[in-house]
Structures are given as structure tokens and as C-alpha cells.
Amino acid sequence: MRDKLANALKTPGADYIEIRIEESKASRLVYHGNRLEEVGRTSSLGGNVRALVKGGWGFVSFNNIQNLRENVDLAIKEARLIGKEHFRLSPTEPIIDVAMKGAKGPLAVSLETKKLLLDEYNDIILSTPKIQTSSIGCHDGQKKITFASSEGTYIEQTRADINLRVTAIATANGEVQQLGLSIGSPGDFSAIKGLQQQVKEMAQRAVMLLSAPQVKGGEYTVVLDPILAGVFAHEAFGHLSEADHVYENKKLQEIMVLGRKFGDKHLNIVDGAAVPGLRGSYKYDDEGVPATKTYLIREGILESRLHSRETAAKMKEKPTGNARAISYSFPPIVRMTNTYIEPETLSFEEIISDIKEGVYAREWYGGTTSLEMFTFSAAEAYMIRDGKVAELLRPLVLSGNVFATLGNIDAIGNDLEMNQGGGCGKRGQMPLPVSNGSPHIRIRHCLVGGS
Amino acid sequence: MEEILSQAGKIAEQSEVFQIISRITPVNFEANRLKEIQAKESTINALRLIKAGRVGFAQANGYIEPKKLVEMAQETCQFGMPAKFIFPNKMVYPRIDVFDSQVENVDIESMVQLGEQLIAAVTKHTSSIVCEAMVTKGVITVNIINSEGGNARYNKSFFNISLEGVLIKNEDMLFVGDSLSSCSPIVDFKPIAEEVMMQLDLARETASLPTKLMPVIFTPRGVASALMSPLISAFNGKIVFDGASPLKDKLGLQVFDNHFSLWDDATLPYQVASYPCDDEGVPGQRTSLIKNGVVSHFIYDLQTAALANTQSTGNGERHGGAPAPSPSSLIIEQGDTSFSDMIKDVKEGLIVDTLIGAEQGNILNGDFSGNVLLGYKIENGQIAGRVKDTIVAGNVYQLLKQIVAIGKDARWVEGFLLTPCLYCSGLSVASRTV
């Protein structure tokens, strides 16, 4: 294979060519209520070629990996239709690394073992009084990626991922309430074991939501738990730090100028695939650039952003190893990896102690951003009254303007936790394995949607 | 394919092979310029088999030895759900036009030109806007064969053009955009350019709203982004069967305004969501979901229909795995009120065009809540300007119970929904004041 790639990469006519070949296996189990509705296995083999000619890209993806040379020709032909400018990718050292980790992937665990575990969780939910039904999805996979470029890089690496989502659904008098739990890991099956107690409490809370009131819409002082604050870091600031939004947009460059103050001195936001053992961790990105750990915000000041080799070159900054593709059908684009707010010193009690009326929002349900505006939803929320956590509320949506909101974070806790559930979507590529996290944080003047 | 079916036949009581071959060419523009041209080819073979009464499933993207695929599916069988259905026999499918051979003949240069013309029209209107655009053509071939003699095959072509623009002033970002899809080549960029220019004109001024309940008009894009996710989940036969749909016991009952009708239609010619047969080989059809406010039917695939003791509605669709109920094109019936008459009727209210985050609430219960990415304030019967820092929350069952007026012009949104504007009373709006 290595020789075939090297031969195809010798094709003349492009400033840069890369070839990525992926071989993967995946399995999934999906429950609806007491039915194990889908149990399936998938096997994939495919690849792509990307060619750069004078700043224009040609991209060809395929399942048949026998005609590499033809696919390289096609990618160059496409790129030639575009390229008009003098352009060089940000230089990186060619890397040769075939030291694949022999770690046992999730597929080493039998379907039966997975099913027995999920059956147990499902039984816990369905045996909870007043629960109507459940839904469970467990997806896992592992792949071997071979990457070679015309600059001499040749890398073989393996990646694995597990993602479990368990949802309890309660109904009464025509109303439906639901609560979910998302857990994942970079391949270690034991990460989704031992959740019996959590699943039980989740199902009980889903029932309690039926009689919970909805918050009155408006502005509140909001305290986010580590999971939701991690989603906030990802949605509200992570996406804005992706240089592909910024590099061709002069106005956004003015807004996102390095050195700009975004928050108080206590605010530090980090992204990095070099942070080990998490769902967004890897050794090299999908352009063969080594992973790094990047301070997006250090002591409240915008310090750097996430780059591919192209965006780094255009902005005259350093590549950060954040070019990722969800599969061989897509070109790599700038993505987050493991994104988190660094811990400070305050305890949870200290954070809520002087709030007269506020909202304590917990657990992730979803999030999205338009860069300037973000929204994310809490699956579980409580009123805070006179410095204490008070009544349970229906799930709610929080929203705000990034630039104002980061400056409104006025307390950061000491209890960093990473959330390994879910996945990130961008330009049709989803769900990409990422993780995010934070300690508890407090935000003043946060918009909450409600009745 | 035949080899996979024959190998599976040796070990299974019933089997089915689904194959989809696609060739897609997206042409991408970034920052108002041509950026990337792609060519994507893929071949997927999926095998379902029934052994000892249980369903197994395996899929191969790219080449796989038939024997290997059968082994994978066989492994899953032992845990699979009991099969309540049989694969469809050989049948004659309705003729539904979803293939236009002209799509393949559109050359890359013409696609580039179309995108450039669209961007030129928008940047001529507003010079500082930064646009991303995509012009895509594609052809797919679907083949389904099963052990009961069923045999379905069709080609489908599609052509799509979309634009998303961002206009930044200081720290204010305005997002505008639109898209158009067809099974035939699209040669005219003007409908998208005109929609986007209208959005830019309406958003020129900004206006602020108080925090309270107020009347709301959803544009067709607003209907898609706020109201459809809860409705799609409520009419999914599987969610109904599990008792998690608020409509589970409402069949035949008046739940919505008596002017409100909604149906699913896979038979509309040259619509990208149409098909002669679904991904299980069941013919595509038109299914009424709401007729004059009365819940009339739900959508089903084979297995869910069998569990619920009804027939498949030809909505078994695959999204990377086994078939599950999923809508084709959804159509909301037009009314008789013009958009401008709706606006004239409102003293103080909101027009919702795009929400972000609306699908993240408890959609099972019909709740939606999101930030108004594009929306306008109505003041004394006129559009006063674009609203910002505004979040709305509502429930589709409450909103659609009493509709003030339904638009007389319908529009396709994202290739799957044909809808008029909907004018409703009483949406909760919260705005940032500090």
C-alpha cells in the first residue's frame, strides 16, 4: 500500500497532494422501549485524494482504492479550474510514523456483552413508575487511517470511539417529558459501564419533570454545571476560534484580533488533541500535523485560534493540528478536539451563595451557534433562591451574544469535569468525537427562554 | 448483489439486499470566491436477513466479500428483534419522475458560472457581504432485491444551489441565506438572489421587542426551523407506537386549527424527496397526516406498521442503518391571506424567519425554543426592522390550535417542505435589555 500511495503522489501538476485511506468497523445497538430495534454492524473501506493548485482545492472520494492514479489526476484537474493565486500551505516537518497502538478497540467486546449491559440500563428505566418508554443508542467503532502526502509524510494511525445515549421518557395527561444521559470514550468500553445508579436517578427525575413548572422567560443570573459549561465553552467560544470562519473575513478578523480582552483575568479556555485519553485526543490530525494544546483565551485575553495548514498560512500563524475529517468522504476542516475552561478556586456553594433569584442549569441536551449568537439547552434546571438550589424546572434553553456573555462570567469554580458524550457537527460532518468541560461557572444577564 | 442474496439464502429464512451507488459533485465557494471542487463516489451494500424469526443487519461501504457481509449480519441476528413483517413481493411501481438525464450533462464550468452569478448579484446589492455558496449535482442508483422475489430499481438525479451570507458591522452579524433543489438542472439563480436581497433590505434597520407574549408570523423558512421537528417526531409511527407522541390517542380527533392540513407526499415529480419506492421496496405514496385540523394518519415502515397492526406508508428510509419511519416531502395546505395583509393586521409582533437551537428543546412534547437568528419586528402594521438578542419559546400544539391566518403563497424550503406563512397568536418572546 505504501508504495502504491508513493507512486500515485508522484503525479505532476499540483503544489500539494495528499491521500487518505480508511478501513473501519462499527457496531450499533438501538432500543426503543423494550425492543432492541436495531443491532447492526458496518464495515467500510474507502479513501480520498486532495490536491492543491494555486490556492484552489480538488477533492475526490471513492470506495474503490485500486485506481489511485486516476483519482489523483481528477483531483488535480478540478483544482486547476480554480487556482489563480500564489499560495503555499504553512510549512510542517514531514513525518513518518507507523507505530500503531495495538490497543483493544470497542469491537473486541462482544455484541452480547454490550447487549446485556444495555438491557440492564433499559430495565432500570422501564421499571421506574410512570415511565412511558425509553430510547437507547450505543454506537462504537474503530478505524485505521493511512495518510501520505507529496511532501513525504506517511502516517498510519488507529482511532476508536464509543458513544452511548440513554433517554427516559415519561408521560401523563398528554404531556411528554424526557431526560437523557450521554457518555463516551475513545474506545474504552468500561467508560459506559457502572451507570446503573445514574440511569435510575435520571429516570426518576424525568417523571418529576411532569409536575415541574416552566421558568418565566427573561434575563437571569445563571449557574452552569461542568457539563453544560463545557457545552457553553464549545458553542459560545470554540466555534468562533475556528480559523476557517475568520481567515477570509476581514471584518471578523478585526473582531477576533489576538490580544483582545474577552473576559476577566480568571478566564482561561483551552483546546487540544494533545490532552491525552479523551474522545477528541489523537497524535496527528487529518493533514498529518502533530496535535497540540492551544490556549484560546489566557487570563481573559484572546491568545490564539485553531488552524489547518491553509488557515495558518493565510493568517501567518502556526498550524495547531486541528484539521479533522469525519470520514474519507470529506476533506479535513478546522475542528475542535477537547475544549475546556480551566478551573479556578471557588466552591459551588460560594458561587451560588449571593444569588437572590437565579437559574441553576445542568446536563446537556444540545447546543448550536451562529458565531455571534449561541444557544444551548439544559436537560435539568432548578431555580436558585436566596443562595440555595430551589424547585426543579422544565428543561430550558439559554441563549446569548458571545462577546457580551464571556465578559459576564463572574465566577469560576474549582471542580473541572470533562463531558465525553455527544458529538460536534459542522458543514455536514457530524457527529465528530469531541469532549468538552469546565468547572461550575456563573454568568450574569443570561437570556433564558420560557413562558 | 445477487451473490450476497444467494449466500444469505443458504442460512436465512428471508433476506434483502439494498444497494445505493452515488456520484455527487459539489462546487464550493468561500468568501465570495470559488474555493473547492469535489467528486464523491460511493457504493453501499446493506443486508437484512431473518433467521429463526429474528432480524439481522449488516452494511458495507465499499467492497466486501459477500460471505463476510452475511457472517456479520448473521452475528447480529441472534439479538435482533422478532420479525413481524415479510419483505415485499415483486410488484409494479408507480411512475414517479425523479431522474433527469440532463443533470449528468451539466458541466463544472456551468456550475461555477451559476455560483459566480449568484454571488455577484448579492454582492452587487450589498458590497460588504461575505458569502459561502454551493452548487451540487448528483445521481444515485437504488437497487433492492429480496428473497420473496421483490425487485426494485430506480435512478434519481438532483441539483442544488444554496447561499449563506454574513454581513458584519462592528460586532453585529447578520446572517441571510436560501437554497433551491430539484431533480432537474437549475439554471436560474435569481429566486435565491431575490430572497436573500429581500432579507437584507428588511434587516437594514434594527428594532427591539419587549419581553412578553405577542403575535407571530412564521415565514416558510420560519415554519421549517421552528415547527417541523416536533411535528415530524409526533407523526413518526414508531414514537406513536411507543406512546411517546402526544398524538398517540388522537387519531380522528381535532387537535389543530380546522384550517390546518398537512400531508406527506413521495409522489411529486422532480422533487428531491420523492421516490417510486422507499428503502424497503414499498411504493411511495401520499399520506394525509392532518386534514382540517383532525389527526388522520401516521407514517410507517414495514416493521413498525406490523407492530401497530397497520400498513407501511412507504416511509421506510435509511440514514446509514436499518430502515425507520421518516417523511418524504411534507406539504402544508395554503390559505387565503397574503403576507402583507398579515403584517397589516399586527400592532406589535414578531416575524420569525430563522431560529437557531429550536430543535434542542423537548420536541417530543411539541416544545420549541430558540434564538431568533433572522426575524423582524412588526409595529403598527409595518416591518420596523430586524430584532436581535431575542429568544422565543412555544409549543406547536398550542400555537397551531388557533391559527389567525394561513398564507396564500407556499414555498419550498430545503427541498423537503412546501409551506405558506403561518400567522399565530401568543408566542413567548424574551429580549435582552442590558
Image (cartoon, coloured by chain):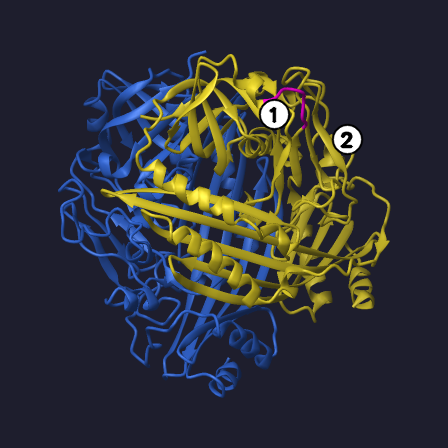
Q: Quadrant of residue A89?
A: top right
Element marked by disc 2:
loop
What is the crowding at mark 1: few (fewer than 14 residues within 10 Å), some, or many (at least 20)?
some
- Amino acid on which disc 2 is placed: Lys
Disc 1 and disc 2: Cα gap in Å?
16 Å
Q: Which residue is mark 1?
A: A252
Q: Quadrant of residue B189?
A: top left
Q: Which chain is blue?
A: B
Q: Is residue A431 magenta?
A: no
Q: Nearer the viewer, residue B90 or A166?
A: A166
Secondary structure predominantly adopted by residues drawn in magenta:
loop
Q: Nearer the viewer, residue A37 or B366?
A: A37
Q: Is residue B7 visible?
A: yes
Q: Nearer the viewer, residue A68 or B369?
A: B369
Measuring from the top left, give residue A227's x and y in whole percent. 56, 35
Q: Which residue is mark 2?
A: A316
Q: Say whether residue B386 is left or right of residue A152.
A: left
Mark 1 vs mark 2: tell me if same chain: yes
Measuring from the top left, give residue A358's x and y in whole percent. 44, 18
Q: Is residue B183 above or below residue B49?
A: above
Q: Residue at the spot x=66%, y=39% of the render?
A: A338
Q: Say whether residue B424 is left or right of residue A61.
A: left
Looking at the rendering, the stretch of residues picked out in magenta corresponds to A342-347
Q: Residue at the spot x=39%, y=46% of the render?
A: B414
Image colour for chain A is yellow
Q: Chain of mark 1?
A: A
Q: Nearer the viewer, residue B105 or A179?
A: A179
Total label count? 2
Q: Chain of mark 2?
A: A
Question: Which is more N-terminal, label 2 or label 1?
Answer: 1
Measuring from the top left, give residue A303's x and y in whole percent. 73, 24
What is the crowding at mark 2: few (fewer than 14 residues within 10 Å), some, or many (at least 20)?
few
